[in-house]
Amino acid sequence: MAQIIHIADFSDPRLDVFARLTEAQLLNRFDPKNAMFIAESPLVIERALNGGYEPVSLLVQECHLETHAKALIERCGDIPVFTAPTEVLTELTGFQLTRGLLCAMRRKPLSPVEEILQNCKRIAVLEDVVNPTNVGAIFRSAAALGMDAVLLTPASSDPFYRRSARVSMGTVFQVPWTYLGENWTQELKSLGFTTVAMALCEDSLSVDDPRLQRIEKLAVVLGTEGEGLAQNTISACDYTVKIPMAHGVDSLNVAAASAVAFWELRKR
């Protein structure tokens, strides 16, 4: 049974995970066995639990204890459930809780690239995509439009950051992902993937080119906000691909571009 604890002291160290630790501190690269993340909203928490992530503690608005938080509280078992009125929790965390619920959860070790890609046909690669909102939106599109996995370069924003997970609607816990190594274009090719760089070049193919749809194992490579893909990445990929656009528009936000590319290049 959950331990319901009404917040009386903001300095309680058990609240640090919600109020004082940064997301980088929660990630805790120097002690990965104790690394955590914050899941926000009932849907995101439910999908994290379904993905096998272990809950550590909950922070719940009092008004939700007996409503939409009740089933999740019961599911999380014997963990601390901190609670207070809405205004107190907003003061504690510094932001309005989405549907009044946060859960601190333990991370699991990331799988190696070759294990993630063992049975994949369509994957997304994010090169230095640093905006958590964009990362979350790309994961949501990947889940909805049939991408089998998402791989990220180390400079990309962590998919389990609170905002990324929330924007993704919890799909970061459903779509397999991991980080890439240094020579990732060659690694993907060695695993049988054809790489397509989403970039505006003179020799770019249209995203609806039927030759692309016939490729058995395809990696869709998307670049950082603003600058796009690095030139050496474009050169290392098998194809460059563009989305035809009207009215003089030369590019889309990376999250919007990902949705178009995933739909057109999905395995039929």
Image (spheres, grey):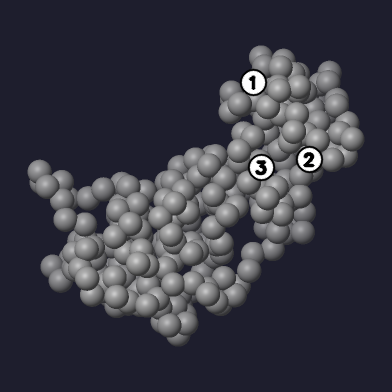
**Mark nearer the N terminus (2 vs 3):** 3
Label 2: which secondary element? helix
Quadrant in which residue 78 is drawn: top right
Which residue is at 29% across, 70% downward?
Answer: 213
Q: Residues within 10 Å of mark 1 (few under 14, many from 20)?
A: some
Looking at the image, residue 52 sits to the left or right of residue 2; the answer is left
Q: Residues within 10 Å of mark 3 (few under 14, many from 20)?
A: some
How far separated are the C-alphas under marks 2 and 3?
A: 9 Å
The residue closer to the viewer here, 92 or 167, is: 167
On residue 46, which mark appears?
3
Asked if the residue under mark 3 is in contact with the one under mark 2, i.e. CB atoms within 8 Å, the reply is: no
Q: Is residue 204 visible?
A: yes
Q: Which residue is mark 2?
A: 75
Answer above or below: position of 120 versus 17: below
The residue closer to the viewer here, 30 or 8, is: 8
Which residue is at 77% across, 59% downward?
Answer: 33
Q: Which residue is mark 1?
A: 90
Q: Position of residue 93 (x, y in %)?
A: 66, 27
Answer above or below: position of 193 versus 179: below
On residue 78, which mark appears?
none
How far separated are the C-alphas under marks 1 and 3?
A: 22 Å
Q: Residues within 10 Å of mark 2 (few under 14, many from 20)?
A: few
Q: Position of residue 130 (x, y in %)?
A: 45, 50
